[in-house]
Amino acid sequence: MGLKWETLPEDELILLVQKGSGEAFVELASRYLPLIHRMASPYRSSFLEAEDLSQEGLLGLFAAAGGYRRDRGTSFSAYAAACISNRILSAYRKACSKKNAALRESVPLEEEEAAQPEPFFGDPEALLIRREALATLLEKFRRSLTPREREALAWYAAGYSYRETAQRLGVSVKSVEGAIQRARKKLRAVV
């Protein structure tokens, strides 16, 4: 008999995510998707799609779940909201940087029709398919990264600098840089 993920309290889900459960994260993500979409919405633009921003928000949620410590006196929802917001804002700032000006100002070769945007929610079957796809992707991420790479990436995704991440993990900055670079390379190969 399997766990009924939707009935588990948030605290238990967080502990399971910290132990590496992709299914627990999928349930946590499904609970936070409306918040992620709301937080990403103001940053949508012609050069930055809502889907990309939502993915950044999911990475922020993953970092929040991995780095959350109940004994620090902050609720998970507040901590997660800050991590999600930081991640989305960071992606937006990066996209708006001078370095990306050419991408922002370019015109697509094929203009897409101005159709109604697809709703994030509404079709339960589509939501289930997205949920399963997310679970598969997260499991691939979990299997491809070492525990050190997961920890370093989680802290970094939560908005901490390499130096702060190194201090939290008790390792050198160079070790954190290497772990994050390896994690990025592995994650690109998985996607």
Image (cartoon, helix red, strand yellow):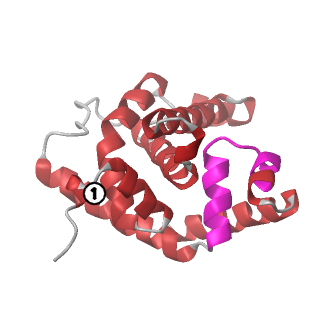
Horizontally, residue 58 falls left or right of residue 89, namely left
Please state the horizontal and vertical placement of residue 93, each as a whole percent of the image: 64, 30
Q: Residues within 10 Å of mark 1 (few under 14, many from 20)?
A: some
Main SS of the magenta part reads helix
- Residue under the point 24% across and 60% down: 5
The residue identified by callout 1 is 131
Classify 143 as above or below 155: below
> Looking at the image, which is closer to me, 15 or 30?
15
* Left or right for 142, reference 163: left
Placement of 100 over or under 183, stated as above or below: above
Residue at position x 82%, y 62% from top? 171
Q: Which residues are magenta?
A: 147-166
Position of residue 163 relative to residue 75, above or below, is below
Residue 6: x %, y % from top left: 22, 54
Residue 111 can be seen, yes or no: no
The x and y percentages for residue 36 are 40, 36
Residue type at mark 1 is: Arg
Quadrant position of the N terminus in the picture: bottom left
Taking depth in this image into account, of 4 and 189 the one nearest to the observer is 4
Instruction: Choose between 51 and 177: the one closer to the eye.
Output: 177
Q: Quadrant of residue 39?
A: top left
Q: Residue at x 64, y 61 (%)?
A: 151
Q: Is residue 4 left or right of residue 25?
A: left
Quarter where residue 116 is shown: top left
Q: Residue 150: say if magenta.
A: yes
21 w.r.t. 68: above or below: below
Give the number of callouts. Answer: 1
Q: Secondary structure at mark 1?
A: helix
Where does residue 186 sit, x and y in percent of width and height? 61, 70
